[in-house]
Image (spheres, grey):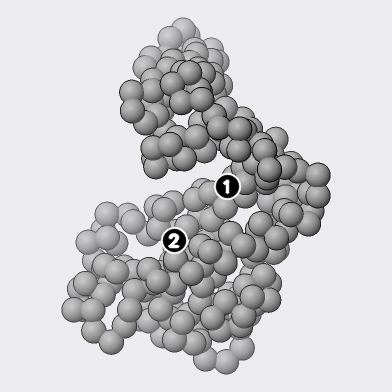
């Protein structure tokens, strides 16, 4: 698929009239695609991704501020982080077929990068940036709000954000700039009713074990234990705990 046809398909998905803009075409150009062409004529979507990230954060912050007038700053921050995490943006990207439309180099194509969560989230942010440049803040809001409302209808984002795995991810990213990982230690018991043990690993030497009848339950228990160890070493500042 070439740049023009990819952008035309995206414009149709976004219900944008006329020929797709240069910004919309740029939003779909991954750096690896340019590397194979000597970077000629075009710029990758990285600058648009930077812009889209800021616009997305501002729109979501505005919605949360108005919708939850009694929530504290720390709570609103946690909700925003939860709502625009990479896994959410990747799902939104898939709803727009961005995984199929982004232009990649041959090596990245073969490696399966097209379906990677991080790539999908980045392309979505770039598209937000492009729409903002072409159609202003209201255009960007029109793109984001239906997707955001569906997330809010799924449940209270603060409650969802406060499960142990989500809290550990938030704290680990704040402290270490990285996402925790979960390693299967063992699975014991009969096949019809196994018990799983997982190890949570976060940052600089934070490890903890958890056990459960499902993988998710074991990971949540491991995350809870890791949070306790992390809190012992790096106590949560009052501003992060939910102050204004």
Horizontal side, residue 205 vs residue 190: left or right:
left
- Name the residue located 50 percent from the left edge and 86 percent from the top edge: 20
Residue at point 53% right, 15% down?
A: 212
Image quadrant holding the C terminus, namely: top right
Q: Picture coordinates of residue 40 (x, y %)? A: 23, 84
Where is mark 1, residue-wise?
81
Q: Nearer the viewer, residue 34 or 78?
A: 78
Nearest the viewer among 18 and 41 is: 41
Number of marks drawn: 2
Q: Which residue is mark 2?
A: 122
Q: Is residue 205 above or below residue 43?
A: above
Mark 2 neighbour class, 10 Å CA radius: few under 14, some 14 to 19, many 20 or more: many
Q: Position of residue 194 (x, y in %)?
A: 49, 13
Left or right for 232, reference 177: right
Tag 2 secondary structure: helix
Give the x, y percent position of residue 128.
Answer: 54, 70
Left or right: 68 in relation to 139: right
Task: Between residue 167 and residue 115, name the one nearer to us.
Answer: 167
Residue at image position (51%, 18%) is 228
Is residue 182 visible to us here? yes
Observer-nearest of 35 and 101: 35
Q: Which mark is residue 165?
A: none
Assess whether mark 2 and mark 1 are in contact (beta carbons under 8 angstroms).
no
Q: How far is disc 1 from disc 2 in space, using C-alphas? A: 15 Å
Q: Residue furthest bottom?
A: 18
Ranked by sequence position, the earlier of labels 1 and 2 is: 1
């Amino acid at each position: 698929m070439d740049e023009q046809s990819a952008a035309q398909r995206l414009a149709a998905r976004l219900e944008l009239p006329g020929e797709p803009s240069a910004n919309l075409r740029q939003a779909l150009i991954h750096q690896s695609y340019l590397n194979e062409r000597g970077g000629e004529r075009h710029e990758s979507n990285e600058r648009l991704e930077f812009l889209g990230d800021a616009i997305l954060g501002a729109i979501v912050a505005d919605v949360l501020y108005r919708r939850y007038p009694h929530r504290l700053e720390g709570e609103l921050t946690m909700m925003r982080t939860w709502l625009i995490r990479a896994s959410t943006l990747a799902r939104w990207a898939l709803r727009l077929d961005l995984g199929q439309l982004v232009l990649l180099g041959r090596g990245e194509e073969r490696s399966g990068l097209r379906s990677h969560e991080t790539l999908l989230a980045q392309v979505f942010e770039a598209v937000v940036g492009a729409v903002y440049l072409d159609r202003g803040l209201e255009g960007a809001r029109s793109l984001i709000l239906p997707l955001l409302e569906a997330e809010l209808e799924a449940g209270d984002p603060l409650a969802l954000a406060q499960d142990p795995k989500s809290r550990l991810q938030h704290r680990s990213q704040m402290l270490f700039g990285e996402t925790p990982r979960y390693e299967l230690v063992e699975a014991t018991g009969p096949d019809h009713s196994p018990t799983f043990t997982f190890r949570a690993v976060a940052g600089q030497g934070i490890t903890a074990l958890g056990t459960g009848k499902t993988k998710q339950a074991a990971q949540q228990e491991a995350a809870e234990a890791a949070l306790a160890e992390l809190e012992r070493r790096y106590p949560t500042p009052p501003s992060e705990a939910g102050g204004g």
